[in-house]
Image (tube, rainbow, N blue to C red):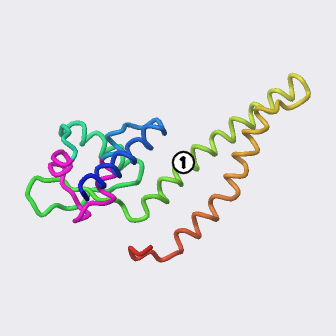
């Protein structure tokens, strides 16, 4: 029974990733690393667990590493690479998203200036984007600081 629950969890993560426009395999790799025991899994282990090719798993571990969600760790086996979920990985991931949202805020601001020059008034579509991303830029950093200051210790 546990096998199927874990498989379902991994697939749920993969579907979430797909909804974000990311590869499902990246979600599967992350899903496995979130629930695996031990937390560190070799590239070979991930390939076996996911029934996936080495190139696919390797490509997606690289993506997840760049996203700040996982990290490479030393492997006890020679010529093996292992990965684990990076402590604080969710915060790193959200901070990277915050930078992208800040760019959208800047773009919306440029659009508002362009429309004001052209028509003398702001367009509601751009104003909404500007307002949303302004609020995110103002509020999210403080929330992330609160999250980072909480001790987790692996307990809920």
Q: Residue at x 53, y 54 (%)?
A: 95
Q: Position of residue 9 (x, y in %)?
A: 35, 52
Q: Is residue 73 magenta?
A: no
Q: Position of residue 141 (x, y in %)?
A: 62, 60
Please state, as top left, top right, bottom left or bottom right, where the C terminus lies in the image: bottom left
The magenta segment is 29-49
Classify 71 as above or below 19: below
Residue at mark 1: 97
Q: Main secondary structure of the magenta part?
A: helix
Q: Residue at x 58, y 50 (%)?
A: 98
SS class of the residue under badge 1? helix
Q: Position of residue 153 (x, y in %)?
A: 40, 77
Q: Position of residue 29 (x, y in %)?
A: 30, 48
Classify 24 as above or below 13: above
Residue 52's quadrant in the figure? top left
Q: Is residue 45 magenta?
A: yes
């Amino acid at each position: 029974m546990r096998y199927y629950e874990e498989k379902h969890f991994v697939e749920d993560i993969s579907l979430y990733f797909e909804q974000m426009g990311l590869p499902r395999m990246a979600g599967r790799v992350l899903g496995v690393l979130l629930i695996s025991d031990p937390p560190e899994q070799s590239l070979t282990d991930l390939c076996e667990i996911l029934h996936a090719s080495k190139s696919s798993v390797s490509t997606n571990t690289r993506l997840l590493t760049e996203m700040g969600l996982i990290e490479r760790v030393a492997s006890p086996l020679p010529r093996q690479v292992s990965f684990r979920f990076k402590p604080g990985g969710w915060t790193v991931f959200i901070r990277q998203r915050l930078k992208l949202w800040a760019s959208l805020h800047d773009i919306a601001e440029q659009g508002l200036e362009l429309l004001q020059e052209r028509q003398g008034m702001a367009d509601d579509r751009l104003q909404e984007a500007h307002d949303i991303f302004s609020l995110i830029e103002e509020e999210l950093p403080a929330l992330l600081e609160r999250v980072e200051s909480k001790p987790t210790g692996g307990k809920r």
